[in-house]
Amino acid sequence: MLRRLAVLLVLMAVLLSLFSVAVAQDQPVTVGPITQRIIDRGSLICGVHPGLAGFGIVNDAGEYEGFDVDFCRAVAAAILGDAQAVEFRPLEAAQRQAAIQSEEVDMMSRNTTWTFSRDATWGATFGPTVFYDGQGLAVRTESGITTIEELDGLTICVQSGTTTELNLADAFRARGLSYTPQVFAEADPTWSAFVEGRCDAFTTDKSGIAAYRATSPNPSDFTILDITLSKEPLGPLSPQSDAQFADIIRWTLFALIQAEEFGITSQNIDEFIGSEDPAIQRFLGQGDNPGGTLYGLAKDFTVNVIRQVGNYGEIFDRNLGPDTPFGLARGLNALWTDGGLMYSPPFR
């Protein structure tokens, strides 16, 4: 009798659990305050770099484009179904914290490093890392400098209000080297001062150096030293006031990575919508799968995102890859299946 009672109780618990899940999925999701503002406004306000080629820049047609810009567009496609429904706010490095804390922007996608202190003090929720970078140093090729030790006692151009400034000081102190910093509040004047010969070296994230070098009249005039001074995990962030919106950002970015792993692109997505693979059906919100409704989005929000913006690999290649002036290799930014760090949790 006791055994039968125990079995009955277990069955009742399982049925109750299944019923609770079914009811929860049928209930309309209450979206967070930032998500609701975006819906009411009909557009996403996204903070971006004021002008870093390959990452965030205004093209000749007056439109924003770049690697970071495309993540703004992906989130707009997820929430509003329209990747073009974005208002871009250019932000200098020193303006980032205030823009997030004041909620001047809904989110920021602007080559911003995720650090312990920023996570603690900025009032921001950092999304997944979308670009694993590291700080580097550039010198004029004619100088013949090949190592950081040869910069001892020289002058280095660096932007203020960044992790770059602190990393530079740490790197030289750790090696017992000295230097004179030439500090500028904005990125472009920092590079310009280096080009004009007002300092012996220039430092920022290696991706930034590659962007400036590639777009200069004579890229061969500048050499990037074979040294990495820091870890720079770059990704988008949003105000802490809306955890639901932060989740939408998180899973939108994971969708871009998972799509590449599945081999789903902006060009072939229609071929996958009818797939009988249950993992792909769940991912694309097909059949009885709840998909985006769990976050108050369209059931097939991933379809909108991939069709309009592409997968992670498409975004990388379009803005930074071999056929661009930057010619960056994927490196750490390759999928985990290819030896990189790009990895999405399961869509289940």
Image (cartoon, rainbow, N blue to C red):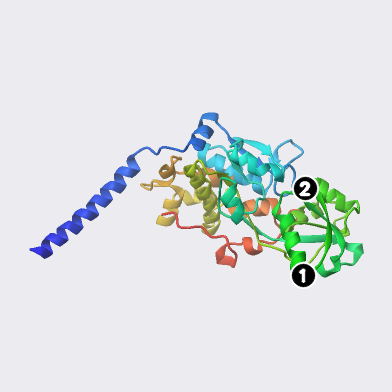
Element marked by disc 2: helix
Based on the displayed image, in which of its 4 quarters is residue 337 positioned? bottom right
Image location of residue 197, percent across then percent down: 91, 54
Q: Residue at x 15, y 61 (%)?
A: 6
The front one of 10 and 314 is: 10
Q: In terms of sequence position, does the residue under pointer 1 or pointer 2 come before the other?
A: 1
The front one of 118 and 32 is: 118
Label 1, label 2: how far apart the Cα atoms are: 26 Å
| In the depicted structure, whether residue 340 falls above or below residue 124 | below
Image location of residue 67, percent across then percent down: 66, 49
Image location of residue 66, percent across then percent down: 69, 46
Q: Residue at x 47, y 43 (%)?
A: 244
Which of discs 1 and 2 lies nearer the camera? The answer is: 1
The front one of 183 and 347 is: 183
Q: Is residue 335 left or right of residue 186?
A: left
Q: Residue at x 74, y 47 (%)?
A: 52
Question: Residue pushed farthest top?
Answer: 40
The answer to whether residue 122 is visible is yes
Label 1 Cα crowd, 10 Å radius (few <14 / some 14-19 / many 20+)? few
Quarter of the picture holding the C terminus: bottom left
Dot 1 amino acid type: Arg
The front one of 229 and 51 is: 229
The answer to whether residue 217 is visible is no
Q: Which residue is mark 1?
A: 175
